[in-house]
Image (cartoon, rainbow, N blue to C red):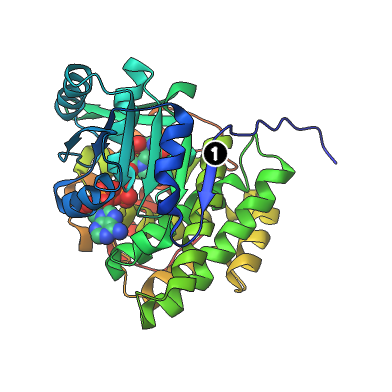
């Protein structure tokens, strides 16, 4: 066994169907009496229903969470938290809403209770992202790691099927890159493999019935594991490409992950054979990259950047950006090979080493 460092995350996880019933006790445990509830406009009703379970403990609801946390939204939410003297942020939603809670916590140290309703995994990480003047900056800070996460699969029953598939692949991407992270460790690799297995296995039953509670539970369990991997070790080429593409061309987050993952894995395959074997085993396929390509296609997700409105004229610029910062990745970053990768991803061609 090689030497490694493992840092466990100090979050408290409350998992299972109806675990939202534990919310009043969890808020009390934190000693909070004035929670600011955060959500997107789409999830206002769901957030209100949760707030209604907490009479006397809600300071207000802010329903303007938006993807990639625009700085203007963060400022507005921070000002409201301060004005209402909130003593905790209760984020009900996906990565965008939890990201808004993190933007508040980063400045104020307010504890976050996260109630995730997608599989993005932000609730399990100390990573924040804020977008200012078209540029998304991300960083790590222990203050933004939610203190408590309530994973209630019932709250994911309403997640539309297309987002269910792409969000689950977003989750599995964390685990896939965690398996070849330069700072990986055996515990995180176990979580990664199990996370991929659980998320992938949930997709077929959810396609047949998006309200299948055991399958929702399995997907959410997998998402927790995959998010934990993201929070614990460094990501490589795939995540960097997705951030570049998403941020520069304003592409939808989970869908970009879904398109890019097979191509990023094919690029890294020869340099990370053991990770590829573990990913393939978790998916129950022969080849990791093709496995993800087929998984997305089988479940009706877009497999080309073209289909999610990435302009072809931006490919050269994206390749330049991809090599502008070097970072640890199993295979060195080569401009010509990355340009070819992006071309295949744009077309929706199968992944190629
Ligand atoms: N900091 C971190 O560790 C991470 C941050 N992120 C960030 O999170 C954002 C993406 O988060 P996502 O969860 O993919 O999307 P999202 O949070 O933007 O949600 C997408 C849409 O689905 C709706 N939705 C969410 N759950 C629903 C449900 N159960 N039923 C019906 N509608 C529902 C939302 O209201 C929203 O309109 C990106 O900005 C990304 O960068 C993603 C992963 C990790
Ligand atoms: O961009 C962020 O807000 C931080 C991390 C992620 O989005 C991880 C991911 O790409 O899914």
Q: Residue furthest right?
A: 1
Q: Quadrant of the N terminus?
A: top right
Q: Residue at x 72, y 30 (%)?
A: 5
Whether residue 220 sits left or right of residue 115 in the image: it is: right
**Which of these two is toward me, 116 or 2?**
116
Q: Residue furthest bottom?
A: 208
Q: Residue at x 36, y 20 (%)?
A: 106
- Crowding at mark 1 (Cα within 10 Å: few <14, some 14-19, many 20+): some
Q: Residue at x 66, y 67 (%)?
A: 281
**Which of these two is toward me, 108 or 320?**
108
Can residue 344 be seen? no
In which quadrant of the rendered view does residue 98 lie? Answer: top left
Check the image and report above or below for 92 versus 133: below
Q: Residue at x 43, y 60 (%)?
A: 18
**Which of these two is toward me, 260 or 39?**
39
Q: Position of residue 14 (x, y in %)?
A: 52, 48
Can residue 92 be seen? yes
Q: Position of residue 169 (x, y in %)?
A: 43, 59
Q: Position of residue 64 (x, y in %)?
A: 15, 39
Q: How many marks?
A: 1
In which quadrant of the rendered view does residue 88 lie? Answer: top left
In which quadrant of the rendered view does residue 79 lie? Answer: top left
Q: Secondary structure at mark 1?
A: strand
The answer to whether the beta carbon of the residue marked 1 is less than 8 Å from any atom of ligand 1 is no
Whether residue 4 sits left or right of residue 275 in the image: it is: right
Please name the residue that numbered disc 1 is placed on: 12
Q: Position of residue 141 (x, y in %)?
A: 46, 22
Check the image and report above or below for 46 versus 303: above
Whether residue 98 sits left or right of residue 274 in the image: it is: left
Check the image and report above or below for 72 versus 184: above
């Amino acid at each position: 066994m090689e030497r490694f460092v493992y840092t466990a995350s100090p979050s408290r996880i409350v998992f299972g169907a109806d675990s939202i019933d534990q919310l009043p006790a969890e808020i009390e445990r934190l000693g909070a009496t004035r929670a600011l509830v955060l959500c997107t406009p789409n999830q206002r009703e769901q957030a209100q229903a949760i707030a209604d379970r907490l009479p006397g403990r809600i300071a207000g609801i802010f329903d303007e969470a938006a993807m990639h946390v625009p700085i203007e939204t963060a400022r507005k939410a921070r000002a409201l938290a301060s004005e209402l003297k909130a003593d905790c942020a209760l984020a009900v939603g996906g990565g965008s809403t939890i990201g808004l809670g993190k933007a508040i916590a980063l400045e104020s140290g307010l504890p976050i209770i996260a109630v995730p309703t997608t599989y993005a995994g932000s609730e399990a990480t100390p990573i924040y992202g804020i977008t200012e003047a078209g540029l998304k900056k991300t960083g790590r800070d222990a203050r933004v790691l939610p203190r408590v996460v309530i994973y209630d699969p019932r709250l994911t029953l309403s997640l539309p099927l297309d987002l269910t598939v792409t969000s689950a692949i977003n989750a599995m991407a964390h685990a896939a890159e965690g398996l070849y992270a330069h700072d990986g460790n055996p515990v995180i690799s176990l979580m990664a493999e199990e996370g991929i297995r659980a998320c992938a296995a949930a997709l077929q039953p959810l396609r047949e019935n998006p309200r299948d509670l055991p399958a929702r539970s399995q997907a959410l369990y997998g998402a927790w594991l995959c998010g934990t991997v993201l929070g614990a070790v460094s990501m490589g080429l795939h995540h960097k490409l997705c951030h570049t593409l998403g941020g520069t061309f304003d592409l939808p987050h989970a869908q970009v992950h879904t398109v890019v993952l097979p191509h990023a894995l094919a690029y890294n395959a020869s340099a990370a054979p053991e990770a590829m074997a573990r990913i393939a085993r978790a998916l129950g396929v022969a080849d990791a990259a093709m496995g993800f390509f087929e998984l997305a296609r089988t479940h009706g997700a877009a497999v080309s950047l073209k289909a999610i409105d990435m302009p072809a004229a931006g490919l050269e610029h994206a390749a330049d950006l991809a090599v502008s910062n070097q970072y640890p990745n199993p295979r060195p970053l080569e401009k010509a090979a990355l340009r070819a990768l992006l071309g295949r991803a744009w077309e929706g061609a199968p992944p190629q080493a």
